[in-house]
Image (tube, rainbow, N blue to C red):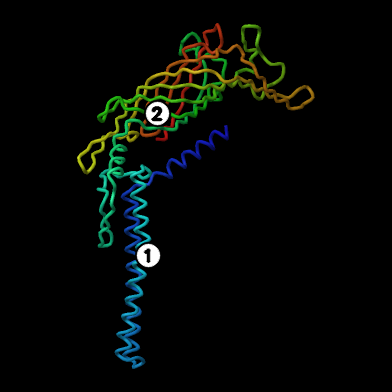
Amino acid sequence: MKRILLLVLFVTTIAHSQEKVFEKEVKKISNTIDKITQQHKDSLKLKVKDINAQLESNKITLDEAVKLKKEAAQYHAEQIEREVSVQEQNLQQLVQDKIDGKVLSSEEDTNVGTFRIAGAEFKLDLSKDEVEKEKRRRKKRTTSQIVFALGVNNVLTNNEFSSLNDSEYKFWQSHFYELGFTFKTRFTKEPSKTYFKYGVSFLWNNLRAENNQYHVVNGDETNLSIHPDQLSESRLRHVQMTFPMHLEFDFSKNKKYSDGEVVDRTHKAFRLGVGGFFGFKLGTRQYLEYRNAQGVMIEEVQKDNFNMNTINYGLSAFVAYKGYGLYAKYDLNPLFKDTGTRNISLGVRFDIN
């Protein structure tokens, strides 16, 4: 589980590190140019002051003072030009990153092409292909997300929610974890609030038995039995690969560009998703820990299918604000063959857009 959490943190860090805002980056470059200009102006003033002081004390002649002032002015002008040119290159790269979709825009999109910084106008020539690429990016109907979810895991008997009260599994100690990748496609070409969300996920479902019980396979049946030793751990884990599909309503406010074009935005407000999933189990293991009669700590890992159904399918839904939400899943097919036991999961969900 530690590896899963580290992977999620790593991916989240990468995702957020790429979220530069175009206008803020332009402002940073502008401030840097202003700072360069002001520093050299201040340095030039100090040099002129020193030259005037030498002239007043007759250490240099008037002709020498004029010559020194010209040399100082020329030097700082060249330094300003050299250092500002570096910032111009940074600005060119920033615009290219924006065209490539690596930099975000603010609420009001800047008109790419001409910028005025520190009193100077910078014209950036964009080819027709680059402009068309930017327009296609605006109208993109499909986006992708990394999904991570976690919460509590348990079972219902005969589809009765009240059966949780009599469950033989620990409620707060039975956990599930989900890590997946999804696509989100708008149903219409024009801005809309309705999307089809689909992808692939890997789930780790854990069930911890109550009352010192563990799972025992008896032919075609799997039963819970009391272990002869005092168990410190009794956990049944089954790993699944699933393909979730949801109808998602995203109520984010549309965005209007300076050229009048309106495009939809996602993951900026409340979202509601309803749908389901289907998939199959990749493996099942039971973990037992106890001390034997000699006081030796025993750790057992039992690998078997435990008469679980290989294929699984069910319903799922989530309600979220921006990238954070509440999540519920319910298997429609029984967890174990020829039983009325079905898996249910409740937790939180993170969609990294």
Would residue 77 be visible to someone looking at this image? yes
Foreground pick, 196 / 157: 196
Callout 1 touching callout 2 (CB < 8 Å): no
As drawn, which residue projects farthest toward the left? 260
SS at mark 1? helix
Instruction: Locate the C terminus by quadrant.
Output: top left
Instruction: Locate the N terminus by quadrant.
Output: top right
Front label number (1 vs 2): 1
Would residue 213 be visible to someone looking at this image? no
Q: Is residue 1 above or below residue 43?
A: above
Q: Which residue is mark 1?
A: 83
Q: Is residue 163 above or below residue 201?
A: above
As drawn, which residue projects farthest toward the right? 294
Q: Is residue 50 above or below residue 288?
A: below
- The x, y position of residue 53, in whole percent, is 33, 87
Say the numbered circle drawn on residue 177. none
Residue drawn at (34%, 64%) of the image: 35
Q: Which residue is mark 2?
A: 183
Q: Amino acid at mark 2?
A: Phe
- The x, y position of residue 200, in whole percent, is 46, 25
Density class for disc 1 (Cα within 10 Å; few <14, some 14-19, many ≥20) is some
As drawn, which residue projects farthest toward the front? 128
